Amino acid sequence: MSEVESAIDADLIGWRARLADNDLFHAFIHSPTAIVSTIVTLLICLGALFAPWVAPHDPFDLASVDLMDSLLPPPWMDGGSFSFLLGTDDQGRDVFSAILYGSRISILVGFLSVIFAAAIGVVVGLVAGYAGGLVDAILMRIADVQLSFPAILIALLIDGVLRGILPRGDYDQIAVYVLVLSIGLSFWVQYARTVRSSVMIERTKEYVQASQVIGLPTRTILFRHIMPNVLGPVLVIATIQLALAIITEATLSFLGVGVPPTSPSLGTLIRVGNDYLFSGEWWITIFPGLALVILVLAINLLGDWLRDALNPRLR
Amino acid sequence: MTVLLALDGLRVEFPSRRGDVVAAKNITLELNAGEILGVVGESGAGKSTIGNAAMGLLERPGRVAGGTVTLEGRRIDNLPPEAMRQLRGARIAMIFQDPLTSLDPLRTIAEQLVTTIRTHLPVGEAEARRRALHLMEQVGIPDPAVRIDHYPHQFSGGMRQRVVIALALCAEPQVIIADEPTTALDVSIQAQILDLLRRLVKDSGAGMIIITHDMGVIAEVADRVAVMYRGDVVETGPTAKILGDPDHAYTRSLISAVPRPDVKLERFPLVEHIESAGPRRDLDLKTHWLGQRRDYQEVDGPLLAVEGLQMLFRTGSLFGGGRHEVRAVDGVSFDIRKGETFGLVGESGSGKSTIARLITGIYRPTGGAIRFAGTDLTTLRSRTALNRHRRQMQMIFQDPYSSVNPRMIVRDIVAEPIRFHKLAGSEAETRRIVADLLDHVGLGARAALKYPHEFSGGQRQRISIARALATRPRFLICDEPTSALDVSIQAQVLNLLKDLQDELGLTMLFISHDLPVIRQMCDRVAVMRRGQIMEIAETEALFERPQHEYTRHLLDLMPKMVKAGDERRTAAG
């Protein structure tokens, strides 16, 4: 046993060497795109996470908002002030702070809906791919039907039904979760299909048969043995879909079926600012729009890089 | 004799960020007109690399770092890619291992042959087609006038390899490099293809390099042999000399590790110069964990009795279109006595592996009975009852690269059956048992914390064996356990299996397509063909006095390398 324990110590010392030896890490530090997009994504995420400390103003604290400051342009234009870095909106709220707070909601919805979709998709894919036959056929036909509804349509449907059922105040409180539900429901199919095809390959491998010979129950084989071997592509899809989910949320909020203006996301900010675009106060909508584009672009680039790095055929 | 192809001091490097890998160190070889030069070696010896280097087909980032390649007196290793492309196919051609992937599935044979001919020779469409027909006749494809318009999928594996050979011959090249040309084929087809290659070289006066890991292939076709070991040619000479009386120690031990078809040995002689396995300690079953709680009911009569076993696979879609049945196992009966090794031998598709999967319960049979220790497993429905029997039988698989989960460390792989069947009292005890098992199969206890990819094929097969032993089985099924391994590693693994059988009193079902291996391992053998058993006999009786015609046919196809060596020895003496 002492030999094994000293091996554990050696392993702990060696993690740095192994990280340097790791192919993915190596590919990462040699790709400027990956590094820049990671830094940008991290900056925006951290800014959003620590918004209450980073933001110069609290745009939702009615006591600190002054209507006298409304519609101020950014500081480099006439009438601008350096206390409002990107100008203010019609309520006198600081646009920069609103973007930081708004990214919070956007990123939260993005992450939650991707996790929700991945959870459904991976389980459906595992079951369909492993069971095969009738179960597979039924699950995949459901997926096909699901795929024929655009995400926005599903969101509008759920939104409409819930708005009809719930009183207005209650609905605003759960608006974020409705978004997560509707985006998640329309995104799970891609995970299911990818996982299913990987499972169909893994299922015939001998380590799965070895587990069957040991007598392991099916769910142990599925979740302990097969799942870790099919998660690589899921990570790639999740990254790319995170960007898609953020855009979908923005679209829904822009259309007015997303989060309420009292706790705005980037999409809500763009919608509110849109009304002022033609009266000259372009900064109210352009800056949240830019923030959205930069965030989505960075995540997408990261996802593309990850896909290439994990796919040995493209290397 | 004219030298067609000469490698002089060839050095091939594959730069990587972990340092340059030298695949070929200092290779000097000559290929004469009208001869077949065999290049033999184990995996990683660099034999494919020199073929690719000669063709200018090194995979990136590999490069020729030194030495020269001369084709018909002209140096070609420094030619620009375009000039090299024109030579390839015209003067020097290649035949690859896998006939399935070296043909374009979307184009007919005629299209592929005609395009290739017209790329290299200044002939018209009609003339090219006439030549194509002639080529197909030459490589022994029956009815070429009809077959030429078929697609690759309409040909069997052996016929496809003939088409690949015809493609290589299109421009009448002077040098043909065949890289493992028969490895993907069954023995009966292998013999035909080797005959064909032999005849083509004799007729055309071209030179051929055959790259292979298989001493049997070398014995069948090669005039001269170059033996490669870790990027070096250690020995070159006439085939009979190399096989019968080699000079180099590596060649000697490599040849002695090839399973002998003619006589059964107690243990394989071990090869020097190979990865070392840790020393094994003898174990005393009375005190060792593997001997504890072997609470099986003893049986009189056979441990396993298979009666009229049948397995139908139904294919077809959900809505019933295109359904048909495949009889993978068709009324098979045999007994396996306690403590013996029972062999199942047959060509691919004969149903051997299906039988293993039926016995272990991976598949459910469509008919017949499997009696293990007196209980008919096909009648058991409850999971607990089945698991009690499953614990007593374990299986070792063919492919060491897929039979262990790549995402788990070795300790968890080997401990899984112990944890699942609750064979150990505590986690500490489990770890001690795993360390002991790993030690016992020659991997050493330190292997427990590594991942499978850190091990070679032979070492992974040892992991697989340790996992199979972890349930303390009394019946072990080995499904082609060494067919993916080099001969030297095969000798080690087979010796390990024999040692374990002696120590633990295991009963074994040993499945293989390789008759010499069967002869070395088994007490009794069943010969299978198309889901049915042709003949069951004691091993020695089967090899000396085969009763069934199919058995005789299989035995005829066994490589005759030892005979070639013996003839040479008598001639010298």
Image: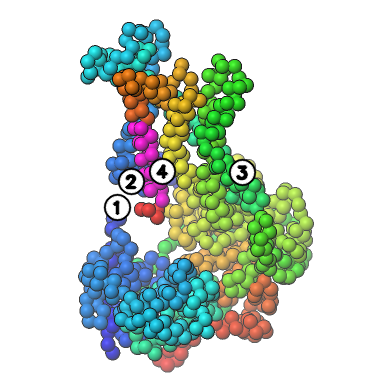
**Would you name the residue on which mark 4 appears?**
A11
Query: In the rendered view, does B185 fall on the left or right side of B91?
Result: right
Q: Residue at x 77, y 59 (%)?
A: B375
Q: Residue at x 44, y 53 (%)?
A: B453
**Would you name the residue on which mark 1 appears?**
B17
**Sequence-wise first label, 3 or 4:** 4
User: Label 2, label 1: how many angstroms apart (C-alpha)?
Assistant: 10 Å
**Residue type of the residue flagged with mark 4:** Asp
What is the secondary structure assignment of the residue under circle 4? helix
**Sequence-wise first label, 2 or 4:** 4
Q: In front of the other: label 1 or label 4?
A: 1
Residue B334 pos. (x, y %): 72, 70
**Could you tell me which chain the residue with mark 1 belongs to?**
B
What is the secondary structure assignment of the residue under circle 3? helix
User: Label 2, label 3: how many angstroms apart (C-alpha)?
Assistant: 41 Å
Is there CB contact under 8 Å for labels 3 and 4?
no
**Would you name the residue on which mark 2 appears?**
A26
**Could you tell me which chain the residue with mark 4 belongs to?**
A
